[in-house]
Image (cartoon, rainbow, N blue to C red):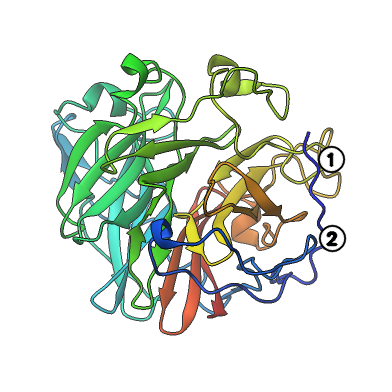
């Protein structure tokens, strides 16, 4: 396993504030970058986006709701978000924060059918939701992927023309698959199907895939704009390890496979055993908080120092951090090379946020902070996350 020469830092206080400083986002295309990077030492953490504080005065910012809609498959009205809401994507548009979030009913299987809802806020803290979901299982070409587990865990970016691209998980009750949808208004979405349909003759269509984090710039006006690196769009994905994929159009993606002779950085297990040809970009780490799995967070951020990826992780004390409870989801960050998105530059040696509030510790799944949405808004960074797979909370820091 690769060693990371970074100082060990441990959580101080309940707010999860660890490291000071963050490099400004790089708002130019990486195709124009020189090979030179800002000078940072081998033990630097100044590249990381941390020092977030949980906003206790408003959290949770979204809880299960009373909305209902006519389900096109069941042919009946369904209380589509009465059980749980969690794992949001964030878009800043027209001086508002828009949240696309996963919601579950109480009747689908397993654990309730998931659909993706939409809410908005003028301040980033108080949200008004749409009464009906905007993406859901329907009588369409994706039904066999989405019914009846549902549509889960969105992440949203836009292209230079302003079209929105969502990666989301379709779950049929057995297999998770990474799908893509597009929109111009965040309300009406066109499903484009499996992200890997055209890759390697469909080799990965029936393999476990989810959590697509597309490399983007976070603009001063809040837009998250997908950007090419060496002529390709890049995406980090997966939830055993984190892999990568490239695309020409943000719809059809090609997973990055190993070259002949490449060795895996860690022994394959779980879902990775069925995909041994993939190149692992972010492995798990024994004796760490991220021992059991790692999973992409919000859209990856292109900065002057590299590509900053916030990632989620799960811990098993027997092989990981003995100070964290079994199954704890905590989050950390890794910096990838802006000219070689497969190459690690730095990786934090500890988490910067973990469950420590009652609504994070107890819920559908206990001990979970799952980071998925990040907004640059009103002079602040706002980080949105699912809590115990039951509610949604926010943490903030100044730019």
- Location of residue 98 (image quadrant): bottom left
Relative side of 25 to 98, left or right: right
Q: Is residue 110 visible?
A: yes
Estimate the x, y position of residue 334 in percent, counting from the top left.
64, 53
Q: Is residue 105 visible?
A: no
Secondary structure state at the residue bearing disc 2: loop
| Label disc, if present, on residue 118 of the rendered structure | none
Q: Compare marks 2 and 1 and give the one earlier in the sequence.
A: 2
Q: CA distance from mark 2 to mark 1?
A: 15 Å
Mark 2 lies on residue = 7
- Location of residue 110 (image quadrant): top left
Estimate the x, y position of residue 30 in percent, counting from the top left.
43, 58
Viewer-side label of 2, 1: 2
Q: Quadrant of the N terminus?
A: top right
| Label disc, if present, on residue 287 of the rendered structure | 1
Relative side of 279 to 2, left or right: left
Q: Nearer the viewer, residue 331 or 56?
A: 331
Relative side of 250 to 14, left or right: left
Q: Is residue 334 above or below residue 287?
A: below
């Amino acid at each position: 396993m690769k060693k990371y020469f970074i100082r060990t830092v441990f959580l101080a206080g309940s707010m999860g504030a660890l490291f000071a400083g963050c490099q400004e986002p790089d708002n130019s295309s990486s195709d124009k970058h020189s090979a030179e990077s800002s000078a940072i030492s081998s033990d630097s953490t100044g590249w990381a986006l941390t020092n977030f504080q949980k906003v206790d005065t408003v959290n949770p910012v979204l809880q299960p709701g009373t909305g209902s809609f006519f389900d096109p498959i069941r042919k009946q009205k369904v209380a589509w978000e009465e059980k749980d809401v969690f794992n949001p994507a964030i878009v800043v548009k027209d001086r508002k924060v828009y949240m696309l979030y996963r919601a579950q009913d109480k009747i689908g299987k397993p654990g309730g059918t998931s659909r993706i809802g939409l809410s908005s806020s003028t301040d980033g803290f108080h949200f008004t939701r749409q009464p009906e979901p905007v993406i859901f299982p329907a009588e369409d070409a994706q039904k066999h992927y989405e019914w009846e587990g549902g549509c889960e865990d969105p992440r949203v970016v836009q292209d230079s023309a302003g079209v929105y691209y969502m990666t989301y998980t379709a779950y049929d009750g057995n297999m998770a698959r990474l799908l893509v949808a597009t929109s111009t208004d965040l309300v009406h979405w066109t499903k484009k199907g499996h992200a890997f349909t055209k890759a390697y003759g469909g080799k990965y269509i029936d393999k476990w895939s989810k959590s697509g984090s597309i490399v983007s710039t976070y603009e001063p006006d809040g837009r998250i704009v997908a950007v090419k690196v060496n002529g390709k769009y890049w995406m980090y994905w997966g939830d055993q390890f984190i892999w990568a994929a490239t695309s020409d159009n943000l719809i059809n993606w090609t997973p990055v496979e190993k070259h002949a002779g490449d060795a895996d950085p860690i022994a394959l297990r779980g879902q990775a055993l069925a995909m041994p040809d993939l190149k692992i970009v972010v492995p798990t780490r024994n004796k760490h908080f991220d021992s059991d799995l790692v999973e992409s967070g919000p859209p990856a951020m292109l900065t002057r120092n590299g590509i900053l990826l916030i990632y989620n992780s799960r811990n098993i004390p027997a092989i990981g951090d003995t100070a964290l409870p079994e199954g704890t989801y905590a989050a950390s960050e890794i910096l990838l090379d802006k000219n070689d998105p497969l190459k690690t530059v730095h990786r934090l040696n500890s988490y910067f946020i973990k469950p420590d509030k009652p609504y994070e510790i107890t819920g559908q799944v206990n001990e979970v902070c799952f980071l998925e949405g990040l907004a640059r808004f009103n002079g602040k960074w706002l980080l949105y996350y699912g809590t115990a797979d039951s509610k949604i909370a926010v943490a903030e820091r100044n730019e």
